[in-house]
Image (cartoon, rainbow, N blue to C red):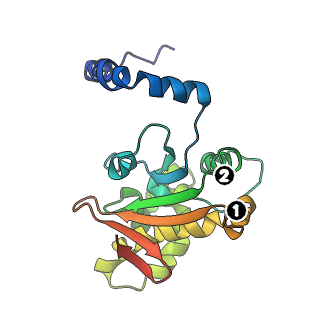
Amino acid sequence: MRNVTALPSYLVQRYHGWKATAFTENRAWYRRLAEDGQRPRAMVISCCDSRVHVTSIFGADNGEFFIHRNIANLVPAYAPDGEQHGTSAAVEYAVQTLRVAHLIVVGHTNCGGVAGCLAMCSGHAPELEEKTSFVGRWMDILRPGYERVKDLPEPERIGELERQAVVVSLENLMTFPFVAAKVEAGEMTLHGLVHDIGDGRLWQLDDSGFHVI
């Protein structure tokens, strides 16, 4: 393709370093993953934000997590309308084919997508209201969360909306019949987390709200 160019040299150098060390030292494990296929125990839905690195947070090995990343770690409601749904497809594959035991939504602090949603819903980002804005239409998923936090004192809204990005996603996951069936049968569990980028804390959701692990 004419518009595709070679990788930056620093990435090529890093690749060769990985191939000569981590890969070579674990060659048998990588071969096993290739031949036997993946059997992850958990699916993780997290943000595209480059500062969020769930495999590092949990010290996960290759093959341990089935990871899907998108803007603001959102899951849309179940919508079998024949259109293209990347996040829903990932959820379907993880639950129906890979049969993961855990489905984990990981939010984070200082989320640009959530900040955009807050600005859009409060009338301060008209560009995101345009039908041509992919980000804006994706962040529409979080509008129910905004309705829950809009009357809070202004300094508290962004942090609470970041939590709502996790809550809304978990609520929407339960609109998928195959997810609800697995959860209700005790064959799969749902989990909600918020990672504080600045201090490393991890907040976990339970029936009474979010608490530091």
Among numbered discs 2 and 1, the one appearing first in the sequence: 2
Residue 57 spot, x, y in % from top left: 33, 52
- Tell me the kind of residue under disc 1: Lys
Q: Could one spot residue 123 in this view of the protein?
A: no
User: Label 1 crowding class (10 Å Cα cut-off): few <14, some 14-19, many 20+?
Assistant: some
Q: Position of residue 172 (x, y in %)?
A: 62, 66
Say if mark 2 contacts mark 1, CB within 8 Å. Answer: yes
Location of residue 26 with respect to 196 vertically, above or below: above
Residue 16, above or below 62 = above
The residue indicated by pointer 2 is 95
**Which residue shows up at 40% across the image and 76% down it?**
210
Q: Which residue is drawn at 35% across and 51% down?
A: 52
Q: Mark 1 points at which residue?
A: 182
What residue is drawn where x is 59% and y is 24%?
Answer: 35
* Residue at image coords 49%, 60%: 105
Q: Quadrant of residue 97?
A: top right
Instruction: Give amino acid for label 2.
Output: Val
Q: Do we see residue 173 in this rendering?
A: yes
